[in-house]
């Protein structure tokens, strides 16, 4: 509190002297250098120190979509388990922003939320330095470093009753800031350990995001290695949509990242070699410009047919509108890469009463969508590199990689389909994944599966999870509550 009084005097002296760019005479009091620099940036952005609250940019109706689309949404369980219990007990609130300083999430001491509402610390407001001056969230985003802002170090007087600590969180793929996490509370709750706590939590969040990037990289490699193999030893590389090289031939000669301009078909490497850029369903393939006379890699089809949403197909990176029946046809052709006759395809889709004439009509319409060069006839087959979620789940289960199978599975395969072979494959994948997860006795995998569309209503999974989670695990209460609901139902 004494420190807050001193800072208040410094604030009044500096502001009355014309701002932080003016050297103070007499007592020589001055704010910390990072505070002085932040005040200068804020005042240059025309922030009024007497401004009451930050601007409200997003309504409560906007927030669910913004949260679902934000990278930090996937690490919110970690942030809550790490910070919210501490915030609640110590009279703090946890705030999480995006890279522009919009508050997207808030949790913490319920007794403090009314006070936080009063100064605009609630989801939907923007707390960047340009909008509300020096504050922990806005300044940590401006400096790209953890900061602690206490009392009258805030430029806007409405925040002088608060003490705040924030740290930035980075995208491990690009290195860009994706947001900030913050702990804020009344003056008397200031504690030097909060800086280390918030910084460590930001690092934990980045590590969890890094694991997700590594899993996505491995999936992209598995699905697209045939493109690299099709170069038959000529120089080439697989590149993520953000420009990172994750596989190359020959090994070891490639930079970590290349800058691919949207719509460009060529890129120059640092060593001066020009590479052709080919769009894949996911990412890009680089191949030597001198190899342009070689046959181009095959077309790439990416099928996402598992889950409750509409089936999704991309052809060489371009989305293709798709309804259920053509999705069924594509599933059958993906499962039989050597091709099938019209009679066999009709039986797969319609049972013993299937009519090859009906199948020919479906094939004709599908060829108009993806091209006759991709969907061949006599027999019906796909002349493309096929990447499918159901194929990835099946392959991972056969290889015993349960975590990869669960990560690739978005839900049941074409749940509205009554085609005999699709029903059979759907049951095979669901039963195989469930049994594989249960057999691991891995608490993390079981917990993930319990929140998965295939596991939310599975009482045995919840029974097993309640039995193996340790008493102090923060997930136990929610799992036990869902288990009790399943027992009632």
Image (cartoon, rainbow, N blue to C red):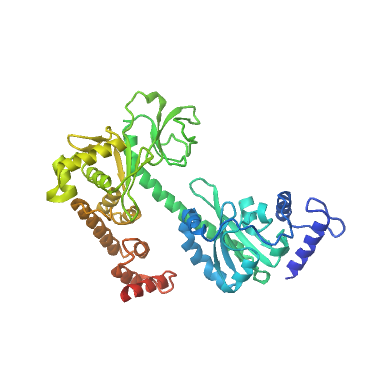
Residue drawn 59% across the image and 57% down it: 167
Above or below 189: residue 69: above
Residue 7 in which image quadrant: bottom right
- In percent of width and height, residue 205 lies at 50, 57
Above or below 484: residue 199: above
Say left or right for 402 vs 472: left
Q: Nearer the viewer, residue 149 or 455?
A: 455
Residue 250 visible: no
Q: Residue furthest left?
A: 352
- In percent of width and height, residue 40 lies at 74, 51
Which quarter of the figure is the N terminus placed in?
bottom right
- In percent of width and height, residue 454 lies at 31, 61
Which quarter of the figure is the C terminus placed in?
bottom left
- In percent of width and height, residue 64 lies at 48, 59
Say left or right for 17 vs 387: right
Q: Nearer the viewer, residue 210 or 454?
A: 454
Say left or right for 152 vs 203: right
Residue drawn 44% across the image and 73% down it: 472
Residue 151 visible: yes
Say left or right for 52 vs 307: right
Q: Residue furthest right?
A: 26
Above or below 193: residue 71: above
Q: How many marks?
A: 0
Q: Nearer the viewer, residue 181 or 32?
A: 181
Residue drawn 41% across the image and 49% down it: 214
């Amino acid at each position: 509190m004494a420190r807050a009084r001193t800072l208040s005097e410094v604030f009044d002296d500096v502001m009355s002297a014309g701002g932080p760019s003016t050297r103070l005479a007499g007592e020589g009091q001055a704010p910390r250098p990072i505070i002085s620099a932040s005040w200068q940036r804020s005042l240059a952005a025309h922030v009024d120190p007497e401004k009451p609250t930050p601007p409200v940019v997003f309504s409560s109706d906007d927030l669910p979509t913004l949260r679902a689309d934000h990278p930090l949404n996937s690490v919110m369980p970690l942030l809550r388990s790490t910070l919210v219990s501490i915030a609640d007990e110590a009279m703090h609130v946890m705030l999480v922003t995006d890279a522009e300083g919009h508050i997207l999430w808030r949790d913490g001491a319920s007794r403090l939320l009314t006070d936080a509402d009063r100064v605009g610390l609630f989801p939907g407001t923007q707390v960047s330095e340009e909008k509300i001056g020096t504050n922990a969230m806005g300044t940590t985003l401006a400096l790209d470093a953890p900061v602690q802002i206490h009392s009258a170090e805030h430029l806007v007087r409405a925040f002088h009753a608060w003490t705040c600590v924030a740290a930035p969180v980075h995208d491990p793929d690009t290195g860009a800031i994706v947001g900030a996490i913050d702990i804020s509370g009344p003056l008397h709750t200031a504690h030097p350990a909060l800086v280390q706590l918030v910084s460590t939590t930001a690092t934990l969040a980045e590590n969890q995001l890094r694991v997700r990037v590594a899993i996505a990289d491995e999936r992209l490699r598995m699905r697209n290695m045939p493109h690299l193999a099709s170069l038959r030893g000529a120089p080439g590389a697989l590149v993520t949509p953000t420009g990172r090289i994750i596989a190359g031939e020959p090994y070891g000669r490639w930079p970590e990242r290349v800058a691919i301009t949207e719509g460009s078909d060529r890129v120059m490497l640092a060593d001066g070699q020009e590479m052709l850029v080919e769009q894949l369903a996911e990412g890009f393939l680089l191949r030597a410009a001198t190899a342009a006379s070689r046959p181009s890699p095959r077309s790439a089809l990416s099928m996402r047919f598992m889950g409750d949403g509409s089936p999704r197909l991309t052809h060489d990176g371009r989305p293709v509108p798709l309804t259920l029946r053509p999705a069924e046809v594509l599933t059958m052709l993906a499962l039989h890469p050597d091709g099938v006759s019209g009679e066999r395809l009709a039986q797969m889709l319609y049972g013993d009463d299937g009519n090859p004439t009906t199948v020919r009509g479906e094939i004709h319409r599908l060829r108009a969508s993806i091209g006759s060069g991709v969907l061949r006839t006599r027999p019906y087959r796909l002349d493309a590199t096929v990447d499918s979620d159901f194929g990835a789940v099946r392959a991972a289960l056969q290889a015993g990689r349960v975590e990869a199978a669960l990560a690739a599975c978005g839900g049941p395969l074409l749940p509205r389909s009554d085609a005999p072979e699709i029903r059979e494959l759907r049951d095979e994948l669901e039963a195989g994944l469930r049994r594989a997860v249960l057999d691991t006795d891995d608490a993390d995998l079981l917990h993930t599966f319990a929140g998965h569309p295939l596991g939310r209503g599975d009482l045995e999974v919840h029974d097993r999870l309640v039995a193996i989670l340790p008493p102090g695990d923060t997930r136990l209460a929610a799992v036990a509550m869902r288990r009790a609901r399943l027992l009632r139902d």
